[in-house]
Image (cartoon, rainbow, N blue to C red):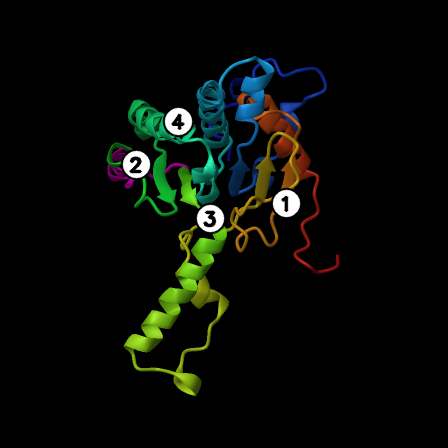
């Protein structure tokens, strides 16, 4: 169900966008977003890339508010991949500082709105203040019952899957099981070792900036997700762009491989 009247969630929508066409019973339970285009947004304005990342923070706020108000239960944002360490050190350092400052600045408001904040990925290599900011957000909001905001940071799907397989192998070895005695690897067993265990698979994956790739994001979990790609660069992604994605999603016929 919508948590606010549609007129409040989408005030004064652009011509041709009808928020009242949204159906509460057809809302995606889980939206995952590949936030792309901060660097290109900055370049178009002759700014350094970090300015683009800072501009993207407002789009993150907008997406969180909009998804929560629409009754979405889980929102996953791809904020930093395992491959992003290859970027210039000044950009990486700036991003880590931005993560920490933003999380600390936003956590109280997120808490008041009942949002639960969690992370997926390996936080071990992150600077201490960045890890502590994410830890504080989890500790402060873990009991909230509203939307769960999942921040994918230092996340890579291949590493996640390999880690799950290693966990299964380690458990089998610890139990002295091998060969025919080893446990059968089922989907349930494999998923129990993923970072996303307990989180439903995304219904809708949104990618901004027009790129047509997954970039090592939730490769297992998006097997039957619907995809929506927009040319809009992430800092320009607002609630009306989210509305476009939601309306497009609700026109889909999800068959999960069956015929209807």
Quickly name the residue at label 4.
Answer: 90
* Residue 5 higher or lower than 168, as above or below: above
Quickly name the residue at label 2.
Answer: 134
Front one among 171 and 43: 43
* Residue located 36% across and 65% down the image: 167
| Front disc: 4 or 2 | 4
- Which badge, 4 or 2, comes first in the chain's sequence? 4
Q: Indicate the secondary structure of the residue bearing disc 2.
A: helix
Residue 22 appears in the rendering: no
* Residue located 53% across and 37% down the image: 33
* Residue 231 higher or lower than 124, as above or below: above
Specify the principal SS of the magenta part: helix
Residue 20 appears in the rendering: yes
Front one among 194 and 69: 194
Quickly name the residue at label 1.
Answer: 226
Residue contact at pointers 1 and 4, CB within 8 angstroms? no
Crowd tier of the residue under label 4, counting other residues whose Cα lies within 10 Å: few below 14, some 14–19, many 20 or above: few
- Which badge, 1 or 3, comes first in the chain's sequence? 3
Residue 52 picture location, percent across and down: 49, 20
Residue 139 picture location, percent across and down: 24, 39
Quickly name the residue at label 3.
Answer: 156
Q: Which residues are magenta?
A: 131-147
- Could you give the CA–CA distance between mark 1 and mark 3, rounded to whole angstroms? 20 Å
| Front disc: 1 or 2 | 2
* Residue 192 higher or lower than 201, as above or below: below
- Could you give the CA–CA distance between mark 4 and mark 2, rounded to whole angstroms? 21 Å
């Amino acid at each position: 169900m919508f948590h606010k009247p549609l007129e409040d969630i989408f005030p004064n929508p652009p011509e041709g966008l009808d928020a009242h066409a949204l159906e509460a019973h057809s809302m995606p339970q889980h939206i995952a977003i590949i936030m792309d285009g901060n660097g290109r947004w900055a370049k178009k304005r002759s700014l350094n890339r970090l300015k683009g990342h800072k501009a993207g923070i407002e789009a993150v706020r907008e997406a969180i508010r909009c998804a929560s108000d629409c009754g979405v239960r889980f929102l996953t944002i791809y904020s930093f991949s395992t491959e992003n360490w290859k970027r210039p050190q000044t950009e990486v350092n700036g991003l880590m500082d931005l993560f920490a400052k933003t999380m600390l600045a936003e956590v109280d408001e997120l808490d008041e709105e009942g949002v639960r904040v969690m992370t997926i990925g390996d936080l071990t290599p992150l600077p201490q203040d960045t890890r502590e900011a994410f830890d504080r957000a989890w500790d402060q909001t873990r009991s909230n019952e509203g939307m769960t905001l999942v921040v994918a940071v230092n996340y890579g799907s291949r590493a996640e899957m390999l880690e799950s397989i290693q966990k299964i192998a380690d458990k089998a070895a610890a139990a002295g099981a091998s060969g025919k005695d080893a446990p059968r690897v089922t989907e349930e067993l494999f998923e129990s070792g993923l970072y996303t265990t307990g989180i439903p698979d995304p219904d809708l994956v949104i990618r901004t900036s027009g790129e047509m790739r997954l970039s090592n994001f939730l490769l297992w979990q998006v097997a039957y997700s619907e995809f929506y790609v927009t040319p809009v660069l992430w800092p320009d992604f607002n609630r009306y762009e989210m509305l476009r994605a939601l309306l497009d999603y609700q026109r889909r016929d999800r068959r999960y491989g069956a015929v209807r």
